[in-house]
Image: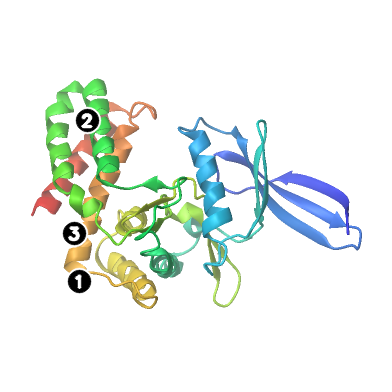
């Protein structure tokens, strides 16, 4: 069997890289539709571009096959000195961010399944080299870089920011605690496709920041900004997915404090990028204030 015709068209998928739908018509009349991600063409500069593309390729090629998580199948790659193309199954559906809130709990159950599936996978062996390590040095370095950025851009905030950094340093053991598992690294609604089906297929994309670390990193990434009953529903959904697949979770109060610790480190990530992303003085001060609020919560 051979290809009779090959066509390529831009894909509307949300990504900083150029993405395409490749349609291949075979000589027997069948048609295949493939998702192509071109790491050589980015809409904006990316830090650590090489590591990010190698990480995503490794996750799709080595970790996700056979996991039964509904992610797009890895179909191949074109990987040489000039081209870095990732070829995946085309999964069509709206991103979660475009759907009503009632659809937002299923991805949290999925996240619990992901973390349960990979929990303990690297207890007796080293994780793959392409994954980031969310250990104490990783979080300490982020906090130190955040302080450097704030002190450089808004010197009058340096003293306040130094106090926030110390709060983060105090909870480093919480951030690096087990069980270690595979993390998506950027688990937000824009990276979740909800494909048709009963039940709908949850397909999580963009694994460039995948890491090995504590489960609450992803959980805090998704739930940051939610409070009250909405947050409770999300945490209940995550608990269902995790515990049904063998991953035990701490009581609600302890889980909530751990999430607050990760929300604090997320502020560090934003401030670390303040210069590169050209944040205004007002935005920087707002983030420092947010860090102070979260720091008080985790210290209580």
Q: Which residue is rendered at x = 44% and y = 50% of the image?
A: 210
Residue 267 seen by the camera: no
Q: Which residue is rendered at x = 30% and y = 54% of the image?
A: 225
Q: CA distance from mark 1 to mark 2?
A: 33 Å
Q: Secondary structure at mark 2?
A: helix
Res 167 quadrant in image:
top left
Q: Label 3 belongs to which residue?
A: 257
Q: The C terminus lies in which quarter of the figure? A: bottom left
Q: Label 2 belongs to which residue?
A: 147
Per the rendering, the mark at residue 37 is none
Q: Label 1 belongs to which residue?
A: 251
Q: Position of residue 26 (x, y in %)?
A: 87, 58
Picture layout, residue 10 above or below residue 199: above
Q: Residue furthest left?
A: 300
Left or right of 173: which side holds 6? right
Q: Residues within 10 Å of mark 2 (few under 14, many from 20)?
A: many
Q: Residues within 10 Å of mark 1 (few under 14, many from 20)?
A: few
Q: Which residue is rendered at x = 68% and y = 51% of the image?
A: 76
Q: Which residue is rendered at x = 34% and y = 75% of the image?
A: 243
Q: Secondary structure at mark 3?
A: helix
Q: Position of residue 245 (x, y in %)?
A: 39, 75
């Amino acid at each position: 069997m051979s290809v009779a015709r090959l066509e390529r068209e831009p894909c509307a998928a949300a990504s900083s890289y150029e993405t395409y739908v490749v349609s291949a018509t075979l000589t027997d009349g069948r048609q295949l539709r493939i998702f192509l991600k071109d790491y050589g063409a980015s809409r904006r500069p990316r830090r650590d571009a090489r590591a990010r593309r190698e990480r995503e390729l490794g996750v799709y090629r080595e970790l996700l096959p056979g996991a039964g998580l509904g992610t797009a199948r890895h179909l191949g790659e074109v990987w040489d000195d000039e081209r870095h193309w990732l070829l995946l199954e085309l999964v069509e559906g709206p991103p979660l961010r475009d759907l009503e809130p009632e659809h937002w709990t299923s991805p949290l159950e999925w996240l619990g399944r992901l973390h349960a599936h990979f929990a303990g996978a690297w207890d007796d062996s080293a994780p793959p080299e392409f994954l980031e390590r969310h250990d104490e040095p990783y979080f300490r370095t982020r906090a130190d870089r955040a302080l450097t950025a704030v002190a450089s851009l808004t010197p009058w905030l340096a003293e306040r920011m130094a106090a926030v950094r110390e709060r983060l340093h105090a909870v480093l053991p919480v951030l690096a605690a087990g069980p270690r598992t595979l993390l998506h690294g950027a688990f937000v609604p824009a990276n979740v496709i909800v494909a048709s089906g009963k039940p709908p297929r949850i397909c999580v994309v963009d694994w460039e920041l995948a890491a090995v670390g504590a489960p609450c990193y992803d959980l805090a990434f998704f739930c940051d900004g939610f409070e009250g009953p909405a947050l409770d529903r999300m945490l209940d959904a995550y608990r269902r997915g995790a515990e049904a697949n063998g991953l035990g979770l701490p009581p609600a109060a302890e889980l909530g404090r751990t999430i607050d610790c990760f929300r604090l480190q997320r502020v560090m990530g934003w401030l670390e990028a303040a210069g590169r992303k050209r944040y205004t003085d007002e935005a920087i001060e707002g983030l420092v204030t947010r860090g102070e609020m979260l720091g008080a919560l985790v210290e209580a």
